[in-house]
Image (tube, rainbow, N blue to C red):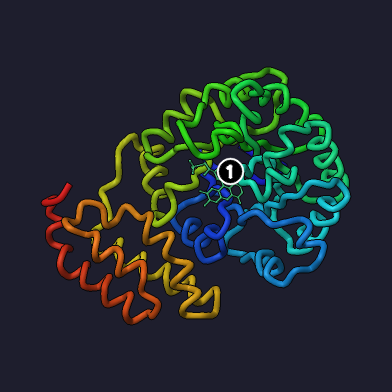
């Protein structure tokens, strides 16, 4: 599979763009465990054009994480095209347009998934960006605005005609937000549309190696994009890759190893943000979502303490205590 002149191995797995999650520290970890391409969190076109300081930081990418996609969002063709030019200077491998973000502060203002209610404008933005930059341009969107407007099959053709080089589809409508189950049948329909020739990246609720396999086999997508299941679990890419290659699950990493990896992520977040407290606060989402602590009896109090800690030694003392007390039990399969 290829996107523009970037080649991928069989069954490519991509790390989905996630605001406040897919910073360089996390992207590099996912990359280390086999993610074939990683996305930055979305970057506001308006903020880029206005040169907002915090937004500049989002333009940082590292050689080791390539290929890396920089995602931008906005609602006015000229501003988004200008933002794409600025993003291009940061030298990502691909520039992606977000037409899928459902949250009010974005979609409500006519950007992200809001553009699913104004297709002519979406297409205008896409054409403007394709014209503005030399880098390949891709799009990530949803099935449609609501249950009665699942327009993705036609929309995919229209976006392709604008010159995008790949299309990522999250199998939900805007109105579904993150509720219900992702519907992959329409993603499969887009992929099987004989008029489509650009790669189709399927996204939504891929949480296990078996589901990843099923998405490739049943819907024929060119790549699978994994989002939430990677939070607090960046080695999921390795688990999926192993299964896709062998048809078998790889042996689980030892509990102590998983704990150490979570600790490493905290340290890397701190390093990235250049501040102990900020790094810890930023890591909380991963510590809260990780499957590592699943099955530990009476974990609630410890969990609360872990997610409240503001100092590194305090946080690591809690985590190390869990490691010490439960390593043997977790390893022996004494907990389910
Ligand atoms: C915390 C969070 C932040 C997200 N931020 C973005 C974003 O910046 N850009 C984007 O296109 N999608 C964003 N998404 C949507 C994901 O990329 C993905 O489409 C969605 O989570 C479904 O995939 P999953 O079931 O594998 O998580 C975000 C999702 C979450 C949970």
- Residue 262, percent across and down? 36, 65
- Residue 326, percent across and down? 16, 63
Query: Quadrant of residue 190 in the image?
Result: top right
Query: Quadrant of residue 167 in the image?
Result: top right
Q: Residue at x 52, y 58 (%)?
A: 21
Q: Is residue 282 left or right of residue 260?
A: right
Residue 10 appearing in the image: no
Q: Residue at x 46, y 32 (%)?
A: 180
Answer above or below: position of 324 versus 143: below
Residue 77 appearing in the image: yes
On the image, numbered disc 1 is attached to which residue? 8
Query: Quadrant of residue 118 in the image?
Result: top right
Answer above or below: position of 2 versus 234: above
Q: Is residue 198 left or right of residue 272?
A: right
Q: Residue at x 84, y 47 (%)?
A: 76
Q: Residue at x 37, y 79 (%)?
A: 312
- In what quadrant of the picture does the N terminus appear? top right
Q: Is residue 336 left or right of residue 309?
A: left
Q: SS class of the residue under badge 1?
A: loop
Q: How many marks?
A: 1
Residue closest to the eye, 234 or 322 = 322
């Amino acid at each position: 599979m290829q996107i523009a002149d970037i080649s991928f191995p069989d069954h490519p797995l991509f790390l989905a763009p996630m605001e406040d999650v897919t910073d360089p520290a996390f992207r590099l970890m996912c990359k280390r465990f086999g993610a074939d391409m990683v996305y930055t969190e979305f970057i506001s076109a308006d903020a880029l054009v206005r040169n907002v300081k915090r937004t500049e930081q989002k333009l940082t990418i590292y050689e080791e994480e390539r290929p890396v996609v920089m995602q931008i969002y906005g609602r006015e063709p000229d501003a988004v095209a200008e933002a794409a030019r600025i993003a291009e200077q940061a030298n990502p491998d691909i520039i992606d347009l977000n037409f899928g973000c459902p949250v009010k502060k974005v979609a409500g203002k006519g950007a992200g998934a809001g553009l699913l209610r104004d297709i002519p404008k979406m297409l205008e933005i896409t054409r403007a960006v394709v014209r503005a930059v030399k880098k390949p341009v891709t799009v990530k969107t949803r099935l449609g605005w609501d249950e009665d407007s699942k327009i993705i099959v036609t929309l995919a053709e229209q976006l392709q005609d604008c010159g995008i080089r790949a299309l990522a589809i999250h199998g939900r409508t805007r109105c579904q937000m993150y509720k219900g189950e992702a519907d992959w049948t329409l993603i499969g329909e887009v992929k099987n549309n004989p008029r489509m020739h650009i790669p189709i990246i399927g996204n939504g609720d891929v949480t296990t190696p078996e589901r990843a396999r099923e998405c490739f086999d049943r819907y024929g997508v060119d790549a699978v994009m994994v989002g939430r299941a990677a939070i607090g679990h960046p080695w999921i890419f390795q688990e999926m890759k192993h299964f896709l290659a062998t048809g078998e699950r790889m042996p689980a990493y030892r509990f102590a190893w998983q704990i150490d990896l979570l600790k490493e992520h905290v340290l890397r977040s701190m390093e990235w943000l250049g501040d102990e407290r900020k790094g810890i606060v930023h890591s909380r989402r991963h510590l809260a979502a990780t499957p590592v602590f699943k099955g530990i009896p009476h974990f609630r109090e410890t969990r609360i303490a872990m997610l409240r800690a503001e100092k590194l030694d305090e946080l690591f003392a809690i985590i190390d205590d869990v490691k010490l007390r439960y390593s043997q039990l977790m390893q022996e399969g004494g907990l389910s």
